[in-house]
């Protein structure tokens, strides 16, 4: 896991611009960069053996994201890009950890810039939906829904996201309970299954 932060270089009072590459999602000047390798995702994937093998075989980068470090205020907007690389752990596609917002009643939008895959949405009551994304497609993530990016393609899956500045990230609920649903590859195609490790 790596990250760095220099929020101060942006003028949150008078406005600013920032670069994001359309294809790669990479930014030369974003305030905060985060990288997640297979070893940062222990327990996220069902297949522990496949997870260990991948770590031994070079511990590949699964996803990274760039964000601006917005002031934690409901007046501001947090935004950035998320890049999930192609690959699989066993029969599960490379995906992000997924998170709820700390302020659960806050929404988000994701706009797909390149690649293909899905956003898997799930609320605490167990309602869920799977949203297919490809370049030019925007997903509205309603308040209360955890969200996870899943790359089912062969290219990096790149999205631009934007949400309320003070919403915050709750990774712990997903780490503890898991997702109720998982997207796995079966006969060469994505298929939703119930997560056998999900804890009520
Ligand atoms: Mn979010």
Image (spheres, rainbow, N blue to C red):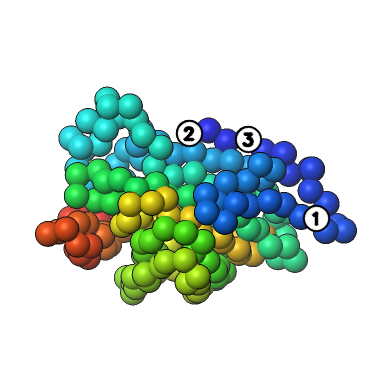
Counting from the top left corner in percent of width and height, residue 194 is at 20, 63
Mark 1 touching mark 2, by CB under 8 A? no
Residue 194 or residue 186, whichever sits in front: 186
Disc nearer the start of the sequence (1/3): 3
Pointer 3 and pointer 2: residues touching (CB < 8 Å)? no
Q: Verify CB contact (< 8 Å) between mark 1 and mark 3.
A: no
- Report which residue position mark 1 lands on: 16
Q: Which quadrant would residue 199 be assigned to in this image?
A: bottom left
Q: Distance between the residues labelled 3 and 2?
A: 11 Å
Neighbourhood count class around disc 3 (C-alpha, 10 Å): few under 14, some 14–19, many 20 upward: few
Residue furthest right in the image: 14
Whether disc 2's CB lies below 8 Å from ligand 1 is answered no
Q: Name the residue under label 3.
A: 4
Q: Residues within 10 Å of mark 2 (few under 14, many from 20)?
A: few
Residue 53 is left or right of residue 99, and the answer is left
Q: Which mark's residue is nearer the viewer, 1 or 2?
A: 1
Q: Where is residue 161 in the image (x, y as percent from the top left)?
A: 56, 61
């Amino acid at each position: 896991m790596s990250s760095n932060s220099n929020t101060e270089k942006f003028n949150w009072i008078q406005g600013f611009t920032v670069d994001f590459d359309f294809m790669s999602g990479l930014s030369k000047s974003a305030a905060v960069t985060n990288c997640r390798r297979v070893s940062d995702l222990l327990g996220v994937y069902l297949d522990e053996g496949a997870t260990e093998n991948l770590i031994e075989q070079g511990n590949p980068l699964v996803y990274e994201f760039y964000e601006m470090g917005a002031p934690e205020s409901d007046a501001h907007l947090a935004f950035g890009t998320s890049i999930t690389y192609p690959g699989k752990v066993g029969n599960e596609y490379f995906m992000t950890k997924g998170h709820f917002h700390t302020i659960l009643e806050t929404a988000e939008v994701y706009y797909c810039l390149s690649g293909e895959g899905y956003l898997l949405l799930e609320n605490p009551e167990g309602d869920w939906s799977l949203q297919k994304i490809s370049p030019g497609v925007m997903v509205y993530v309603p308040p209360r829904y955890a969200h996870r990016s899943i790359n089912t393609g062969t290219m990096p899956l790149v999205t631009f996201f934007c949400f309320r500045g003070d919403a915050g990230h709750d990774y712990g609920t997903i780490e503890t309970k898991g997702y109720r649903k998982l997207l796995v590859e079966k006969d060469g195609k994505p298929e939703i299954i119930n997560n056998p490790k999900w804890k009520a």
